[in-house]
Every structure is written in structure tokens, then in C-alpha cells.
Amino acid sequence: MTNEVNRFPFFHEAEVPAGGEGWESMYPYYLVPGTETREHEDKQFWFADTMHWSRGCHPFDSIGAEAVYLGVGTFSTRIFALPVSLGLDVRVVNGYVYISPLAVTDPARIAERAEVFQKRAGYYYQNWDELYGKWKTKMEGAIDSLRTISFPALTEYDPDEVVLEARGRSDAMAVIENYHRMTDEFFAIWQYHFEFLNLGYGGYITFFQFCKQAFPLISEQSISRMVAGVDVLAFRPDDELRKLAARANDLGLVAEVTAGHSADELRELLEQSENGRTWLAEFNAVRTPWFDYFTEYGFTHDQETWNSDLSVPLQGISRYAAKIAAGEDIARPIQRLREERDEIVTEYRALLTGPEAAQFDELLGLARKVFPYIEEHNIYVEHWAHNVFWEKSRELSRFLVAAGFLTEADDMFYLNRFELDTVLADVIQSWAIGVDSRGKARWAAEIERRKPIVAALQAASAPPAYGIPPEQVTDPFAVMNYGVTTERVADWLGSADGDENVLSGIPGSLGIVEGPVRVLRSEKDLAQLQPGEILVAPITAPSWAAAFAVATGVITDIGGMMCHAAIVCREYGIPAVVGTGFATARLKTGQRVRIDGKTGKVLVLDAEPTGDPTAITDDSGIPASR
């Protein structure tokens, strides 16, 4: 990192990957570190948001970094006025997105903001169900609005209707207007995203902090298990895979769906029988909306959905069908989780009396009320809305190819959103005047310059952090979602003490498991995961759920107690350690490890891969203070 002081490099000290020189010109100026903002940037602690942008982003894809952190800031700073936290400042460095929590430390300002927060947040908490219903309506409306956007092709002459209906304006004007609508809806959707999210985290964190104070020996796992067993929309896509697997079993089609056929091969095979056609009809009936589901987090234009790559859901169906045929129960253990949850709640509540007991009940009720949103919003925003946004973006890129401005549709994504606005103005104005686009050669050369730059940025990994770390990481968003804790920062700096054969992370889901690891970088590699292996990944996306039917444990580089991997593993009863920082770099497929989902420790048992069979033990995890 740096030997100057116990800090990370500053932005202006960052080394540019070979071939990435000149990357700064690709992004809006306010996303890039600069000399005029250096004093502020050097004072901050910045960590990489590789949860959402796992690789260097194309210029157009940086629109997400703008929209996301505009949403965070608006609701944290200006609308709900979180008492001790403002928004998350954002920069793009060497193509990667970095964010910095901004704290409020002045007691007078904290008190002022607390008064605003209590009034406004209290209104939402008191009317949560009604307002959440309105939120869903808003989101569905925004997604439907995105779907109506089109980019009419440029023709020799405008349609007759322009004259016969006396419209008084060219249809071509819709291209620019719809581009603005597309980006405006995207920003609005990310405002909606944070309307409830910070309050959702706040409700859980308030309960979390109460429990830590009331029960000093309680484990984080015990607290999280008190809100487990909640049936939320986020599990619906995986539930549909399970249902289809069960139907394949009922219809005598297990051999067909587990044979490893491609989507086209399987369709042709199943169309030959009545039962096969029945299954195909049921499969197609659930594709919209449940397969409009990204294999990653949906933040870049080049990510696939289940619908665009049917091999992903078919792989999950195959795994489940094989388990059913073998007599295994593939249902999520909801009832067991609820029984354990209720047992833990009863035991801890019995330790309280009077006002404390009433407060416990109230805060637990709030945590359970807000919890579904913490998972469900991903379906509406990152999957359904992003799916339509990227579809419309690709439509626009094809429009530019048809208009003769671009050679390849993907070339559009080497322009940032403001540059694309000027390109569209050029294309429409040039067409209207009757001349070739005036910037075609200029932008073609610039796009060719940028292609190797983006490739170089994506080939390099992102340093975990820049700047001066705080003595204690206290930002709840950083801790709960990203797993950026004081201990993780010490690990990144290399100043943490410990055995090199031990990886420390955050206890994501209870249980102890021992076995060989399978290191995977993306969902495209999930077919390699074998029964009995421990899945190791940078982060698991929501669509990885089917893999949890195979994996006996999960280890991630990124994530906190409320990240998706931790929540899903708890619901599926799989041991997990998240936020280790270096698991994918330090572990090799085939190495045996022992993970403890209660302590957050991963013990490396073999220096090199051995290929030994898996040995599994299970620890149901009794609360630490019982």
C-alpha cells in the first residue's frame, strides 16, 4: 500500500494500469478526482464498490454510479436527514467505482438532523405497509414507462401522418426526447430505490444496537436469526426453478432436463411429447417476469439475464430435479428457521422486564416489518428496471448503427451519457439538414482510442481502498451491506495480526463445514460447482440461489451481515463467511478449508489442492449468551 503513514495511497498516487493512460477523459468530470477537489479527496477514506461494479466500467455504464449515489445522498442528507451520516461521495478511479461515507460529527447539527429524522422517518415507519404499497405502484409505473420508449428509424422522408395529422414536428425529435426520458426514468428509479432502503437498514440496525446493549454476549448471528424465515419476493425466481424441477419429476422428464442439453436442444426434444409440451408451456409462463433476472447485479450493459441465457436457469432446474429424483427434499427450511427464530426470541426476551421488554417487542416488530424491503427492492430495481433500461440502451445503439453513425452496436457504450446526448443531436440535425453526421469520424477515432483503455482497466484489479482510514468504521451502510469494518481495513493495510492460514470475515450464516473449495469468478462458472464443495466467490448475486442447493458452505470477498449472500445463506441454512477480502486470491480450487459461520473464521487445512472427499459437520449454532 504505502509506507508513508498507516494509510492507503491517495487518488493522485494511484498507478494507472499499462495501456489505461488517458482514462480520465472518458467519464463526467465530477466523477473523476481532480486538483481542485484534492484537498477534500485526500481527507476521505474511499473503498471500492466492487459489489456492484466488479470490473472497470464502460463510460456509459458510469451512469449507474451517478444515479445510485445521487439517490443515497438525496435521501440520507436532504430528505430523511440521517442524524450522524450524510451521503456516500463517489469517484471513478481507473474505471472502478469508489465511495466514501460522510459523517456528521457536530453535536448541534446531529441534534438538528435527529429532530427532522424522527418526524419524517417516524411517518414512514408508522405507515410502512401503505407507503410500501405505493412504492411498488411507482416502481411498476416507472418500469412500464421505460418499456414505452422507442427510437424510430430515420427514413428518407417523415411518415405521411406528420402531414395528414398536422403534427407540426418531425418524428425524429422523439429520438432525443426518448433518450432523455430513458435517463430521467433511470435516475427517478434510483430515487425510489433509496426512499425505503436507508429506513430499512435503520430499522434493523436500531434493533441490532438495542440487542448488543441489552445482551452484551449476544452474537450477531443470533440477532439476525430473530428476523429469519421471512418469505420475500427475492426468493421467487429460485422458487420457480424448484417448482419446474418438481414438475419435471411429476411428468417423467428428469432424464431430459438433467442431460445437459442446450436450451434449443431441450426444447426440440420436449416438443416431441405431450408431457414435454406441458412442461415447456409452464416453463415459458414463468419466464416473464421471473427470468428477467441478472446473473450478476445488473449494473453494466454486458450482463446477461436468465432470459437472455437460458442455460443458467436450466442448470438450476437440472440440479434440483436430480435431487428430487434422488429422494431429497429441496424445499427451503422455512419452518425450521421460524421455530429456531421463535425459540431465540423467547429466550432472550425472558431476560428482560418492564420498559426494556416492551422496547424489545417494538424494535423486533419494526425490524421484521422493514426486512422484506431490504431484499425485495433488488427485484424491482436492479433486475426488472435495469433489464428494461439496458434493453432500451441496446435499442438505441442499434439505432445509431442503422443511422450509419456507429459500426458496431457495442461502440455506443464507450461514450458517456453526456457525449451520447451530443451525438444524438448531431445525428438528428445532420439528417434534418441532409448531410452526413459531422462527428462520425471524430467519434469513431475516439471510440477506437478508448477500447484498449477500457480493456486495460478491466484487466487490472481494484485496490480495496484509497485515503485515510478512520480509527473506527461506524457507517452502518458500509458495515451492514459492504462488510467494510475496522478489522477489514486493517487486513487491507496488512496491519492485522493473525495466522496466515486463517482468513477472517464476517459471520454470515451459522454452521461449521469442512471440505474442498471451488473458486468461481462469475455465474457462468457455476456448472463447475460439485456437490459437497464450498463455494468461494467475490460476491454472490441474487440469481446464484440454485448453487446453494449444491454448495455446503459459502465464502465471499465482499459483503456484510445484511448483504445478499449472508441473508440467503441464513434462509437456506448454509454456513457462510462473508467479507473476507482475499478469499478468491488466497484460495485455490481443491484446497480443503474449515469455515465457521459463527466466528467468521476460515481455516485453511491444506497448502495445496488435494482432491480429498468432502467431510461435513454441522453446528446448529446456539446463541453465545445462552
Image (tube, rainbow, N blue to C red):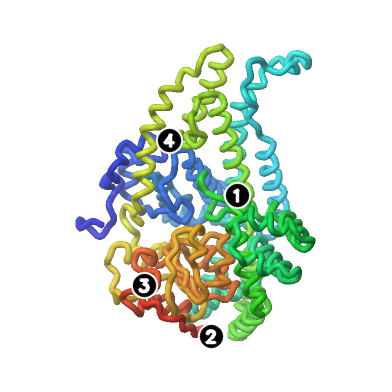
Name the residue carrying label 1: 308
Picture quadrant of residue 183: top right
Counting residues from the N terminus, which is met first, the one under dot 2 or under dot 3? 3
Q: Residue at x 42, y 50 (%)?
A: 55
The amino acid at mark 4 is Pro
Q: Secondary structure at mark 3?
A: strand
Residue 601 in picture, x, y percent from top left: 40, 76
Callout 3 crowding tier (Cα within 10 Å): few <14, some 14–19, many ≥20: many
Q: Residue 74: x and y, percent?
A: 54, 46
Callout 2 amino acid? Ile
Residues under labels 4 and 2: Cα distance?
A: 51 Å
Q: Is residue 21 visible?
A: yes
Q: Which residue extends farthest bottom? A: 626
Residue with the mark numbered 3: 503
Question: Residue 550 at x, y = what percent?
Answer: 55, 72
Which marked residue is nearer to the observer: mark 4 or mark 3? 3
- Residue depth check, mark 2 versus mark 1: number of the one nearer the observer: 1
- The tag earlier along the polypeptide, 4 or 3, is 4
Q: Earlier in the sequence, mark 1 or mark 4?
A: 4
Report the Cα–Cα distance between label 2 and label 3.
23 Å
In the image, what residue occupies the spot 57% across and 48% down?
A: 79
In the figure, is residue 437 to the left or right of 5? right
- Residue drawn at x 70%, y 47% as measured from the top left: 140
Position above or below: 597 against 15 = below
In this rendering, which labeled residue sits more in front, label 1 or label 4?
Answer: 1
| Mark nearer the viewer, 3 or 1 | 1
Could you give the CA–CA distance between mark 2 and mark 1, rounded to whole angstroms? Answer: 43 Å
Q: Mark 2 = which residue?
A: 622
